[in-house]
Amino acid sequence: MQARVDKLRAALKEAGLEGLLVTSPGNRRYLSGFTGSAGALLITAGEALLFTDFRYVEQAGRQAPAFTVVQYDDLYAALGERLRTVGTGPVAFEAEHVTVAQMDKLREAAGVRWEPVRGIVEKLRAVKEPEELELIQKAIDIADRCFDHVVSHLRPGVTEREVAWWIEAFMREHGAESLAFPPIVASGPNGAMPHARPSERPLAAGEFVTLDFGCVWQGYCSDMTRTVFLGNPAQRDRELYELVLTAQQAGISAVRPGRTGREVDAEARRVIAEAGYGDAFGHGLGHGIGLEVHEEIPRLSARSETVLEPGMVTSVEPGVYLPGFGGVRIEDLVTVTEDGCRVLTKSPKELLCLPV
Ligand code: ZN
Ligand code: ZN
């Protein structure tokens, strides 16, 4: 954690900032190790303070040895007191993680020059340390085993919600501390909704089923999608699946250091557009992941100018969604290496046709 704080201090110095108030839970955990639900960090050149309330004082002391723990009754009063001792330069706050009401209180509490910053900690978080990659891999491994287990039980008649529960139960029983997000189980026409919520609809033969899920291991998330078929697919089903798989492989092949998110997105998108389904792929190709399931850096999308660097982790998840028919999506996590990328998700990707 000390190395992370040092990196942040270097970034603050370069930006001419006196300090940073960290209020995002993910950034707070990343920098300090503290996992409690209440608290803030104040990091300046000379100090690293963790403000929290009575409930978390002991936990904070154990989890965040690089920080001085300050107990508060009122966060703003405690901050105001400490901020009187910092220098005259601007103190940054996380514009994306402070409400207007909180900003008013900050201004009232401390007469420093507050300056909004965006993504300053997120930029550090984007490049994963080897230990972080190991934790992500562990979360992925649980999800991979879950997929193997769940598809061996899929059959017509079980509802989407039942399958979602199997996914949840398996991951929790196999070490996951929580789910990264509520599982998506979308059968038949429901597959046309990229973020469909599992319903009481029973699975039926002759349809695709999209499963999108992930879990958390020691704070780190996994996220994977597979689309399987119940019974015998028609020619069009096979073609659609192969199209999405080809696009996904094109996206993975395009991931390497120096590439922008936009360029990688374009490689996969071209495959789908050339087959005439460009309008049916309406979301970005991928997102960063780590302590949060959706991290802003890197983003693989038409507007992303993020330049990929070794150690970044991203999903690669093209999909085709056809209202009234259904959809296909395939999602892996990859990490950027020195000369390309390594696929972290291990589940097979050839079209799985389950007996009915
Ligand atoms: Zn997903
Ligand atoms: Zn995803």
Image: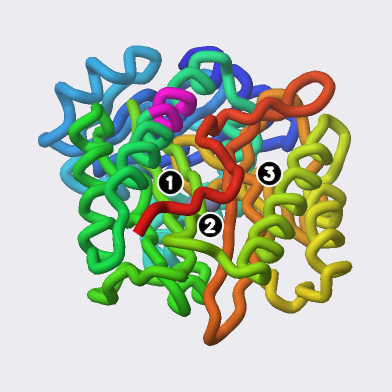
Residue 24's disc is 1
Mark 1 is surrounded, within 10 Å at the Cα level, by few (under 14), some (14 to 19) or many (20 or more) other residues, namely some
Q: Position of residue 321 (x, y in %)?
A: 60, 73
Q: Which residue is mark 3?
A: 298
Three-letter code, disc 1: Ser
Q: CA distance from mark 3 to mark 2?
A: 17 Å
Residue 296 against residue 219 in the figure, above or below: below
On the image, the x and y values in percent for residue 300 come to 72, 51
The residue shown at (31%, 38%) is 149
Kind of residue at disc 2: Glu
Residue that carries the numbered disc 2 in the rendered image: 96
Dot placed on the residue nearer the N-terminal end, 3 or 1: 1
167 sits to left or right of 169: right
The picture places residue 113, in percent across and down from the top left corner, at 58, 50
Vertical placement of 298 versus 82: above or below?
below
Residue 350 visible within the image: yes
Q: Quadrant of the C terminus?
A: bottom left
Which residues make up the magenta segment? 136-141
- Residue count near mark 2 (Cα–Cα under 10 Å), binned few <14, some 14–19, many ≥20: few
- Does 323 sit above or below residue 84? below
Q: Mark 3 or mark 2, which is nearer to you?
A: 3
Q: Residue at x 15, y 22 (%)?
A: 58
Q: Is residue 5 left or right of residue 216?
A: right
Q: Nearer the viewer, residue 181 or 342?
A: 342
| Secondary structure beneath label 3 | strand
Q: Which mark is residue 159?
A: none
Magenta span: helix, strand or loop, mainly? helix
What is the C-alpha distance between the residues marked 1 and 2?
A: 8 Å
Q: Is residue 137 magenta?
A: yes
Q: Residue at x 31, y 54 (%)?
A: 154
